[in-house]
Image: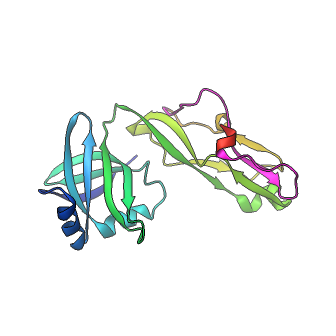
Amino acid sequence: MKATQLTATKREKAGKGASRAIRREGLIPAVIYGDKKEPLAIALEEKVLVAEMGKAGIWTRQYEISVDGQKHHVLCQDIQKHPVSNRPVHADFLRISKTAELTLDVPVRFENEETCPGIKLGGVLNVVHRTLEVKCTADNIPEAFVVDLAKVEMGASITAFSIQMPKGVKLTATEDFTVATIYSAAGEEAPATAEEAK
């Protein structure tokens, strides 16, 4: 997977006061850590980070962040948001190498709901798990698992083991579990929640 290129500046000062000053300049404080190297405090343009947050797959998208001419290959691990404005206030990035095995959550997406036989008959798509935890190297990180609903009938269940894993990607789960179902809205049984399905 090709990495998205970002540019950041090194932060010389840490602390709440310094972070507030950075945000007033339209920047977001962030840190790059991991790969047995010292953490690096950086600042990213807020509009750039917000644009990335608006795209699907931010947690599995690989980034190459350039800081003072040095490039860091990373994954976004966390974005802290303001409780009122919901604007980003801090971001964490994890350094990754091509050969290191990673454990991460990959989103599950559903397509062809409009042609799904079960939904056309009045059924409802009940998503139990919106992500699947997998192990893989950086070269094999899937952006998402796509489930095609074009032939899924009423009452059918889609399980984790039925979703094809790309080469080099393995589910961490050792037992199968329900990812989604198509159930009748008029049925008597309530759909399982993610907690009930564990």
| Number of marks drawn | 0
| Percent coordinates x, y for residue 22 in the rendering | 20, 67
| Percent coordinates x, y for residue 119 in the rendering | 79, 58
Q: Is residue 99 above or below residue 131?
A: above
Magenta residues?
A: 168-194
Residue furthest to the top in view is 174
> Does the magenta run of residues contain 177?
yes
Considering the image in quadrants, where does the C terminus appear?
top right
Q: Main secondary structure of the magenta part?
A: loop
In the image, 158 versus 20, the foreground residue is 20
Residue 178 visible here: no
Q: Which residue is found at the position 34% from the left and 31% from the top?
A: 99
Q: Which residue is found at the position 87% from the left and 53% from the top?
A: 187
| Percent coordinates x, y for residue 101 in the rendering | 39, 31
In the image, 147 versus 14, the foreground residue is 14
Q: Which residue is found at the position 42% from the left and 62% from the top?
A: 53
Q: Quadrant of residue 19?
A: bottom left
Q: Which residue is found at the position 26% from the left and 55% from the top?
A: 30
| Percent coordinates x, y for residue 82 in the rendering | 38, 65
Residue 145 lies left or right of residue 31; in this view the side is: right
> Does the magenta run of residues contain 179?
yes
Residue 15 lies left or right of residue 61; in this view the side is: left
Residue 171 lies left or right of residue 40; in this view the side is: right
Residue 110 visible here: yes
